[in-house]
Image (cartoon, rainbow, N blue to C red):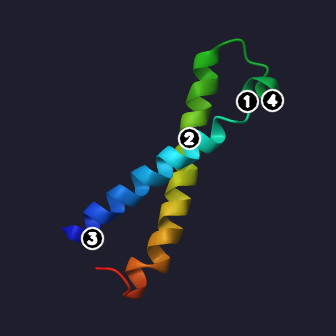
Amino acid sequence: MIASLINYIVFFACFGLSFYALSVIKFEDFCKIKQPGKVTLLMFLLSLALAYLSSQAILSLTIYNGLGV
């Protein structure tokens, strides 16, 4: 129970940080898409992928090695 709660907290923290970090990049210049909704969706999906990878890396270094719960 506690471990899954920590997993969710770490994932959502990583998601917020990755979305904040990806918002600096101007994807409109790279994609040349006229619809801003598609660019926002691309940012959202990239944030999810980056958050998953970073949260799994953080959790594998802490919880799964016996340093956490």
The residue under the point 55% across, 61% down is 54
Name the N-terminal-most of marks 1 and 3: 3
Crowd around label 3: few <14 · some 14–19 · many ≥20 (10 Å): few
Name the N-terminal-most of marks 2 and 3: 3
Which residue has dot 2 on it? 19
Residue type, mark 1 in image: Phe
Crowd around label 4: few <14 · some 14–19 · many ≥20 (10 Å): few
Name the N-terminal-most of marks 1 and 2: 2
Which residue has dot 3 on it? 3
Query: Residue 39: where, in percent of width, then height?
Result: 64, 25
| Marks 1 & 2, CB-CB < 8 Å contact | no
Instruction: Say which mark, if any, is on residue 27.
Output: 1
Which residue has dot 4 on it? 30
Label 4 SS: helix
Query: Residue 57: where, in percent of width, then height?
Result: 53, 70
Name the N-terminal-most of marks 4 and 3: 3
How many marks the image carries: the answer is: 4
Label 2 SS: helix
The residue under the point 31% across, 64% down is 6
Query: Residue 38: where, in percent of width, then height?
Result: 61, 22
Residue type, mark 4 in image: Phe
From the image, state whether disc 1 or disc 2 is nearer to you.
2
| Marks 4 & 1, CB-CB < 8 Å contact | yes
Report, in whole angstroms, how far the alpha carbon at label 1 lies from the one at label 2. Answer: 13 Å
Crowd around label 2: few <14 · some 14–19 · many ≥20 (10 Å): some
The residue under the point 33% across, 57% down is 8
Q: Is 2 on the left-hand or right-hand side of 44?
A: left
